[in-house]
Amino acid sequence: MPRWASDVIVDLLHAYDLPYAAINPGASYRGLHDSIVNYGGNRPAMLLCQHEETAVQIAHGYAKASGRPMVAILHNLVGLLHANMAIYYAYIDRAPVFIIGATGPMDETKRRPRIDWIHTAQHQGEAIRAYTKWDYQPHVIDGAPDAFARGYGVMMTEPRGPVYMCYDAWLQEQKLDREVPLPPAGASRVPTRMAADPAALDSAADLIAAAKRPVIIAEYVGREPEGFHALVTLAETAGIPVYDVDSRLNFPSHHPLNMTTKDVFRHADLVLCLDTRDWEKPTTELVSATREVTSIVPDGARWIDIGFGDLELSSWALDYQRMHHADLQILADTSLAIPALTERLAARKAGDADLRELIEARTADMSRKSRALRDTWARDAKEDWDASPITLPRLASDVWEAIKDEDWVLSAGTLEQWTRKLWDFDRPYRHPGRSLGTATQFGISIGVALAHRDRKRLVVDLQPDGDLMFDAGALWVAAKHRIPMLVVMYNNRAYYNDWEHQIRMARLRGTPLERAHIGMDLDDPAPDFAAMARSMGWYAEGPIESPGGLGAALTRAIAQVKAGKPALLDTITQKR
């Protein structure tokens, strides 16, 4: 049987065990497509998507939920440009996505008239170079294996992120007249993790042991399950409350030391940032209309930062946020640094009776405050309980009541944090992290559901209406590829986040509040999400405006999901 250059790329996909490839079809990779289907036996399994953003988002969600990468394949220049925003969000969310692209032939004599010219760019990877970890375009098929191996290693080295491999269309379609050696099977694919400087960890342990009111901020610690568990051990060993930024699930929501409230910082004398880029939002108060930011951490508090520092710094995207002037900055992977720090604190605790007494008292105090905080949230959730449209706390409560005895996963949206307040996030896989920008949540949620499909977990997506309107065609992707998930709409018939900004402007400028909705509402006509979902093969009910029948509707929908079918409930919620 003849072999083709694109077969070598499939050999690499198999060698690196990449399970799925989300695609939007294109002629620029027709050679690779044929090789995957026929030479590779449809492995990786191809997921057909209506838009390139959806393809990248599915890979993004899969990586967040599983810790493993999958492939997104983009058609030459135009497909790459379509996918730009999704790639950017994968980059700032540190998601390892292996993006395969293609370009029209670099050999001008092989370009089809017009179409190959307008779909081809010089140095095509430059379009996304500012927000990928690496990109490469081999000139000959012999260069593909080393580039593939390097790309995989770069992608999976912390801090992780997307990479882009671009393959010339004519190169793919060449008959292979020689064997192209693959990377050695026993070669290391990813470098070992970065350990902390032992002397610096000793200093950190000294500072923490000397503190009376330390607080932990964690953002990406929970990217690996062992990080989640290690943080619990650290917090319990030293009696330190934890604020979870929620870019990943870092800490159990009902743990007595979970104090994810800004008030915990008001009396802090030490703040320990663990793999945290967003330290500022939790520790400051913002007047949105005037953009005034004020720290709530007392002057004189000490700061320790353990993480990857500026290793992921981009010269273009400002996702690195404001400079953090810590007293002690330790460059390390927290999956190694946290256990090492815990050992040091445990040793100090064992040899110091006063420290043990302080930690016991602090733990008891934080446990009382944490319990009181959850009691307050539970009472607040009962306000306007029977209101129509449905309040967010009521929606969160009813969904929780329906799923709490299942092996559940919350995909992205948190209903303005009401799920994090009311649900018991007790295992590291329960939630891969908060939602990102509009037009990202639904695609990412499909990827999360794909990651949990074989384990038969009930994946729940609390889905904003504006987000789904960007790519309603993605509903078909879940139905087509038998990806069961429960979508409960957070449908306030508006782009209400921006509506609130217009309300702030109106109040600041004295303009009419009643005109703030112009250009923001999703009404007249109101999209019928249930009808839309049914037309694409989903089970769906709605619109549901009153909470009275929500419980029964959830029971019916969950039964459909357990039978292997995606289900959607269009629930109409209040705008606040």
Image (tube, rainbow, N blue to C red):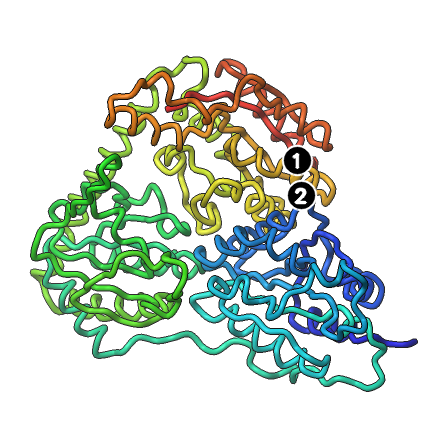
Residue name at image x 47 percent, y 71 percent? 157
- Up-down: is 481 above or below 553? below
Q: Residues within 10 Å of mark 1 (few under 14, many from 20)?
A: many
Mark 1 in CB contact with mark 2 (< 8 angstroms): yes
Q: Residue furthest right?
A: 1
**Which of these two is toward me, 310 or 383?**
310
Q: Which residue is mark 1?
A: 566
Residue name at image x 64 percent, y 58 percent? 72
Alpha carbon of mark 1 to alpha carbon of mark 2: how far? 7 Å
User: Split into 4 quadrants, where in the image is the C terminus?
Assistant: top left
Q: Which residue is mark 2?
A: 483
Residue name at image x 11 percent, y 55 percent? 269
User: Split into 4 quadrants, where in the image is the N terminus?
Assistant: bottom right
The numbered dot on residue 436 is none
**Residue type of the residue flagged with mark 1:** Pro
Q: Position of residue 103 (x, y in %)?
A: 69, 66
Tag count in the figure?
2
Q: Position of residue 86 (x, y in %)?
A: 54, 51
Q: Residues within 10 Å of mark 2 (few under 14, many from 20)?
A: many
Label 1 sits on a secondary structure element that is: loop
**Which of these two is toward me, 102 or 158?**
102
**Residue type of the residue flagged with mark 2:** Ile
Q: Which badge, 1 or 2, comes first in the chain's sequence? A: 2
Q: Position of residue 539 (x, y in %)?
A: 68, 28
Quarter-of-image position of residue 225: bottom left
In the image: residue 122, left or right of residue 253: right
